[in-house]
């Protein structure tokens, strides 16, 4: 992913609300499956790491990206943005520059 593409995805993510919250149990298989499903439907998602989560936001983002085969767009404090291009060209919502 180029810096221009990353900047474009960051601008899209600014207007989004987090759709998942990661809490005390951190990254579970159920959470990973739900995030993978959401990425397939939306392509770009935002997550929020709650204060009671003991893990670092950056490490959580890396683990989720690896497990869901997505890319980390950004991690700012307790917010994570992930992107995964839809496999089916007809379902693609985001066109990268």
Image: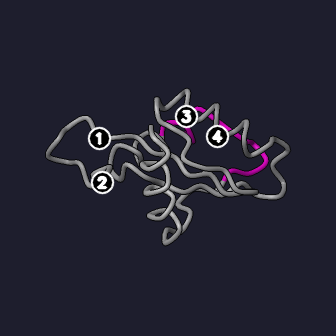
Q: Are marks 2 and 1 in contact (CB under 8 Å)?
A: no
Residue 15, given in percent of the width and then of the height, sits at 49, 72
Number of dots carrying numbers = 4
Residue, disc 1: 86
Q: Look at 32% across and 49% down and name the residue there.
A: 96
Q: Residue at x 55, y 27 (%)?
A: 66
Q: CA distance from mark 3 to mark 4?
A: 6 Å
Residue drawn 49% across the image and 68% down it: 16
> Which element type, helix, strand or loop, lies under badge 1?
loop
Looking at marks 2 and 1 on the same chain, the residue that comes earlier in the sequence is marked by 1
Percent from the top left, x then y, of residue 53? Answer: 81, 49
- The residue at which mark 3 appears reads as 65
Write down the residue under mark 4: 61
Quickly name the residue at label 2: 94
Along the horizontal axis of the image, is 42 left or right of 29? left
Q: Earlier in the sequence, mark 2 or mark 3?
A: 3
Q: Which residues are magenta?
A: 22-33
């Amino acid at each position: 992913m180029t810096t221009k593409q990353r900047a474009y995805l960051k601008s899209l993510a600014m207007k989004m609300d987090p759709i998942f919250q990661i809490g005390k149990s951190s990254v579970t298989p159920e959470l990973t499956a739900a995030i993978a499903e959401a990425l397939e439907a939306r392509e770009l998602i935002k997550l929020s790491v709650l204060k009671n989560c003991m893990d670092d936001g950056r490490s959580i983002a890396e683990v989720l990206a690896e497990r869901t085969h997505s890319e980390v767009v950004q991690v700012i404090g307790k917010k994570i943005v992930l992107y995964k291009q839809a496999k089916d060209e007809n379902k693609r919502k985001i066109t990268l520059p």
